[in-house]
Amino acid sequence: MSHSPIRAYLRPNGSWGLRNHVLVLPLHSALSSSARAIEDACPGAVAITHDWSGEVDGDLQRIIRILAGFASNPNNFATIFLSLGSANEEEIIAQAENLGLANVVHLSLPHIGSTKLLIDVGIREASDLLVRAHEQIRIEAPWSAIVLGLECGGSDALSGITANPALGVASDRLVELGAMSVLGETTEILGAEHLLAARAITQDIGQRIIETVARYEKSINYEGIDLRGAQPSRGNIEGGLSTLEEKSLGAAKKAGNAQLSGVLEYAEIPPARGLYFMDTPGHDIEQLTGYAAGHINIVVFTTGRGTPTGSAIMPVIKVATNSPMAMKLSDLIDLDAGSIADGMETLAEVGTRIFDEIIRIANGCETKAEISGNHEFALSRMYKTIVSYDA
Amino acid sequence: MTSNGFDHGKRGIGVRNHQLILPSVVCSTHISRRIASAVGALSFSHQHGCGIIGADVAGIEDFFGALANHPNVSSCLIVSLGCETIQGQELGARLASANVSTKYQIIQDSGGVEATVSAGILAARHLQESYPPVKAAFGNITVGIDLCRESAQIAELIAGLSEVGVETIVARQGKSSAENFSQLMLAKAHVILSFPSPDQPASGFPLIPVINVASESSLHQGIVADFDLAHESTIEATISRIMEVADAQATIAEMNGTGEILAPRLVRST
């Protein structure tokens, strides 16, 4: 195995962070604005906001796992939890600690007494943690420090020809060196699942990927709705994609040709080196949330239409499938793979550029989304958030 | 009756003069917020607009349309990515044709993040100049009541409000205050009076001032400073607070900037 050029932050549980964030995480939607106020007052701190109000329904365990996993991502030096002090919130914090989060600050609104005071205390705590975070240093890390998430969004007719297979080249090389790489978006392997199953290291894993896709389609069809109403999206169709199957065949190319080592549930952490598939929605932001909660620490996101998408805690490298878009939207694209279609570069050459960019960004250089501060968040739910439209 | 209303043309008369920067999709929420903070407008985060299917496509479009056309809104700039399921361009065009003080900006057509932010700031400022505040007295405020817990005073309160010419709408079916707020927004409530569940905090809603009434629960008693009205406030005190808020006094949720939106969703995302 070649010597790794990666330098990263070693966490007490042995995992590696490629960033060193102080995250402010509200455990109730009504605390979201407080989290944002703390983020605004403390340059360097990051916050997310969400719309979960502690509802106890079919999604409870999923949401607990998402928030606990997100909080404990190795890219976080510390997480400040804002809570109401409920048992479910305590459970999220406990799970985050079990998943390796070393620096925890828990600010409970009823203990502090008011939202105004909560923000004041939060700013003080975040400032202290930022000082401690700055004392951390990067050290030499193995290839396994890279846990790469593969994503595509706003795909077009070139996605499956340029950016996706070039990303596959980079992913294969990282997997071979000992890193982890995770493909997601169950929606977007629908129709290509048999190809992935054939690459599974065991027959069981191959079977599981087939079952995961079937389970997914069934969960959509329960109200008589056809998934193809959202997939391919209208943007995809305008970009030249004809069917979901065509989109899937191109989307799966992000995972190169490596063998498939396992299938992960949404927000599950990959156990060892290799290529994995995670059961996520195709919704870009919900997928990113699942990746972050599954402790992925860097993402490459291929796009045909262009998107500003970023994550609060993971660097997201944007690769354009076509050069006109890369030029037009240059402040949100990190790398242009359109040169493959123009015959200017080979897949292998662009794959190498993506590989080099992953290392550069892993070592601390900022992505376009990090520079613009662009980060969004979405909880992935399986159940309805309202009683009905007629309530 | 209050004389501090704002004439918002087709939207009606509002108790606030909010410019709304409305992201048509989760991907444009961050850019919308940057535009809003540069021009003193309101924006909010949400996770919708893409990957939605079935009844939710029309449901979310109607919901966004109702936000853009709420009486407390002076003007609205829709910020779209361009390739989402809810095509921002179409939503924008439709809402803009329904109301001239609505415009839209598309990231994929605007040349990237900074270009969209700059163009959005210009467009929002232009809207502010074109639609300056027009004061208007008005006689029929609608108060939405979020009843996530029972209140013995409610019938008497509604009667009292009716006597002073205030219409009321009650939302009690929602699983949470957030869901009831959305219903009350759709019904164009100008002000919301919220009775949160004993285990839920005070909360707010962008665009609509929310007056929170405490219960005697230990959570509420632990954070009384977050509530506008104490447990067992008199009917008179409650009505007087509603009038003050309608007349421009900020609620505690407004002062704290508290206010998230729960957009409706019936089907899992794809």
Image (cartoon, rainbow, N blue to C red):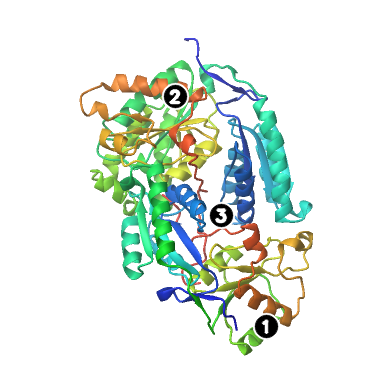
Mark 1 element type: helix
Give neighbour class at mark 1: few <14, some 14-19, many 20+ (Cα, 10 Å).
Answer: some
Q: Estimate the spatial distance between the alpha carbons at disc 3 and disc 1, rounded to whole Å.
A: 30 Å
Left or right, A36 with respect to A193, comes to right
> Mark 2 highlights which residue?
A358
> Mark 3 highlights which residue?
A51
Give neighbour class at mark 2: few <14, some 14-19, many 20+ (Cα, 10 Å).
Answer: many
Looking at the rendered structure, the kind of residue marked 2 is Ile
Q: Estimate the spatial distance between the alpha carbons at disc 2 and disc 1, rounded to whole Å.
A: 62 Å
Q: Mark 1 lies on which chain?
A: B
Left or right, A390 with respect to B156, comes to left
Residue at (47%, 25%) from the top-left corner? A361
Looking at the rendered structure, the kind of residue marked 1 is Leu
Residue at (57%, 49%) from the top-left corner? A49
> Mark 1 highlights which residue?
B157
Left or right, A312 with respect to B228, comes to left
